[in-house]
Image (spheres, rainbow, N blue to C red):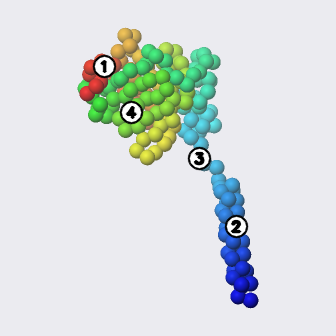
């Protein structure tokens, strides 16, 4: 009799555990969908113009139907605020390559790069300080390619473009 009670108890515990696991899985399936990203929200609302955030692959904001996931080479390099020192510790310093932009305390991986009348609108999957988000920037070069204006696109950002100078290789190393 004691063996039967032990077996019944183990069977009950196993069955209860199995039901809890199955129940937890079905609760996850019923969970509400996540909030859309900034890019998705802009695409859903049909927002256009300066405040539009292009979704990856979105060609409606570009003069050409061609998009790529790389930033054009003319924008590559190390940039700092026009009055900055180009030192690694400069909080306005940014390093642009084809597939990412490194900021002071964050990194943005390019998800879309859309040419727009000589400028480029870059959408980045951002990560920094424990957070992730999507952010778009309009990048504009001066005629001599020595000044970069970067302007965050979206309703959360107020202000105009932030001018940055191109840093020489010797300056950028510290």
Residue lying farthest to the bottom in this orientation: 1
Single out the residue that lies furthest toward the top.
144
- Residue under label 1, please give it: 169
Left or right for 27, reference 53: right
- Which label sits in the foreground, 2 or 1? 2
Quarter where residue 83 is shown:
top left
Q: Which residue is mark 2?
A: 18
In this rendering, position of residue 42 left or right of residue 132? right
Q: Position of residue 126 (x, y in %)?
A: 47, 37
Residue 52 locus on image (x, y percent): 55, 30
Q: Earlier in the sequence, mark 4 or mark 2?
A: 2
Placement of the N terminus among the 4 image quadrants: bottom right
Mark 4 surroundings within 10 Å by alpha-carbon count, few (fewer than 14), some (14 through 19), many (20 or more) = some
Q: Residues within 10 Å of mark 2 (few under 14, many from 20)?
A: few
Residue for badge 4: 103
Tell me how far mark 4 sits from mark 2, CA to CA: 48 Å
Look at the picture and state if 94 lies above or below 155.
Answer: above
Q: Which picture quadrant has residue 36? A: top right
- The residue tagged with tag 2: helix, strand or loop? helix
Tell me the quarter of the image containing the C terminus.
top left
Q: Secondary structure at mark 3?
A: loop
């Amino acid at each position: 009799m004691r063996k039967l009670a032990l077996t019944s108890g183990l069977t009950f515990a196993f069955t209860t555990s199995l039901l809890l696991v199955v129940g937890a899985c079905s609760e996850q399936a019923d969970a509400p969908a996540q909030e859309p990203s900034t890019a998705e929200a802009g695409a859903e609302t049909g927002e256009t113009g300066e405040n539009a955030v292009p979704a990856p692959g979105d060609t409606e904001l570009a003069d050409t139907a061609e998009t790529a996931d790389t930033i054009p080479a003319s924008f590559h390099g190390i940039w700092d605020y026009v009055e900055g020192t180009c030192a690694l510790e400069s909080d306005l310093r940014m390093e642009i390559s084809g597939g990412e932009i490194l900021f002071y305390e964050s990194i943005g991986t390019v998800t879309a790069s859309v040419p727009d009348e000589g400028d480029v609108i870059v959408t980045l999957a951002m990560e920094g300080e424990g957070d992730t988000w999507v952010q778009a920037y309009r990048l504009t070069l001066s005629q001599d390619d020595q000044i970069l204006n970067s302007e965050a696109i979206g309703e959360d950002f107020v202000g105009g473009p932030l001018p940055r100078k191109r840093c020489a290789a010797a300056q950028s190393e510290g």
